[in-house]
Image (cartoon, helix red, strand yellow):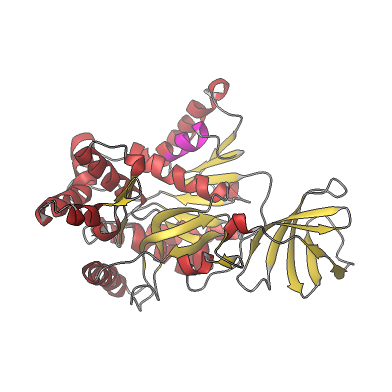
Amino acid sequence: MAWVLSSLKFEVVWCNSSFSSCLVQNRSSSLPSTDHSISLNTRSIYYKIHPLLPLSATTITIFIMHKSSSDSTLGPGGLDLSQAFFRPINNAAPPSPTKRHNKISVIGAGNVGMAIAQTILTQDLTDELVLVDTNSDKLRGEMLDLQHAAAFLPRTKIHASADSSVTAGSDLCIVTAGARQISGESRLNLLQRNLSLFRAIIPPLVRYSPDTTLLIVSNPVDVLTYVAWKLSGFPSNRVIGSGTNLDSSRFRFLIADHLDVNAQDVQAYIVGEHGDSSVALWSSISIGGVPVLSFLENQQIVYEKETLENIHKSVIDSAYEVIKLKGYTSWAIGYSVANLARSFIRNQRKIHPVSVLAKGFYGIDGEVFLSLPAMIGRGGILGVTNVHLNEEETQRLRDSAKTILEVQTQLGI
């Protein structure tokens, strides 16, 4: 959607549902390309130029080019269905102004952090990549190892420091720092060891990058995402947990392997806790657009519920198996988090099952973060998909929320 004012052309990056607040980007050659935060009032806009233009002009008249029906409308009269499919989360805020220069910081240079950094580099997702860790020698070694591959990689500036000030101006801060999970250890058992660490990590990130979005990967991710939200004071849409994005990939892989199809053609979600109380949404699984369970029933093909439960159990046990065999997980979570970073940095508005503030969804009353299918763009969480859950799935999701809330209550956070 574009707004045209004389010879100036602005691309609308984001608008709220009432069009009372919008974010537009200047596409005119007449002025330096920058971002504009504006509020609409009938045919006039009151705008604040950031950061290159004077603030003296306060009211101007514009001509509006409306979206064509092919963009995001369906049905007679261009019925807009976007709000029927997605619901905003509580305590959300408009996105921060976008920039041409992207900067991503990865906090924690362990196996997971470096797998994420390497994947971000090879996929050319950022102009500047920052690594932060308390182990200065290892940190410098990792930085040099990546810098020495400059001839084989997209041009990206790589910095590393034990001082959080190096993260200043980050668009996205990915937090992987934490104690390594021991073989057979529940993710929730990690919490006590990681809680004090977050109290030292999050406040400096907020101080140096007040407009950043936090992407939490450290386990137990749902509770630590809640901790990061509380410590940061950010609106809820700018604090995201990696959640069950990887669990859902494992789920899709196992289903695809079982049916001998490509995993990318399998639509399937794991929601709830990233852990033992996660919920497999069997009722909404489809392959190539065909709902699986409905198809089996219509074709009178008998399947055993135990088979479905075993697949879900394999998803839950996947990380434990990898840890038992190689000592840690790294590559799959690296690709998973880079996938989330891509959706954010490039404003792709893709749907990912990630940990969000779930209050108000599916009868969940408490302030708890757990995974739901959500749209991700430059504003962080842009909305949660209204996926239909049957009664059993809804109850299991509520039980998963209770599991996480009980831990939060025990910790007094």
- In-front residue for pair 132/262: 262
Which residues are drawn in magenta? 116-122
- The reply, left or right, for residue 119 in relation to residue 262 is right
Say above or below: 257 vs 54: above
Displayed quadrant of residue 377: bottom right
The x, y position of residue 149, in whole percent, is 52, 23
| 118 falls in the magenta region | yes
Residue at horizontal 61%, vertical 55%?
71
- In-front residue for pair 107/79: 79
What is the quadrant of the N terminus in the image?
bottom right
The x, y position of residue 320, in whole percent, is 20, 45
Q: Main SS of the magenta segment?
A: helix
- In-front residue for pair 119/191: 119
Residue at horizontal 12%, vertical 56%?
305
Say above or below: 4 vs 392: above
Specify the farthest residue to the top: 151
- The reply, left or right, for residue 195 in relation to residue 20 is left
| 29 falls in the magenta region | no
User: Is residue 254 visible to the viewer in this orientation of the structure?
Assistant: yes
Displayed quadrant of residue 243: bottom left
User: Is residue 208 visible to the viewer in this orientation of the structure?
Assistant: no
- In-front residue for pair 339/185: 339
The x, y position of residue 92, in whole percent, is 53, 70
Residue at horizontal 25%, vertical 52%?
292
The x, y position of residue 121, in whole percent, is 51, 34
What is the quadrant of the C terminus in the image?
bottom left
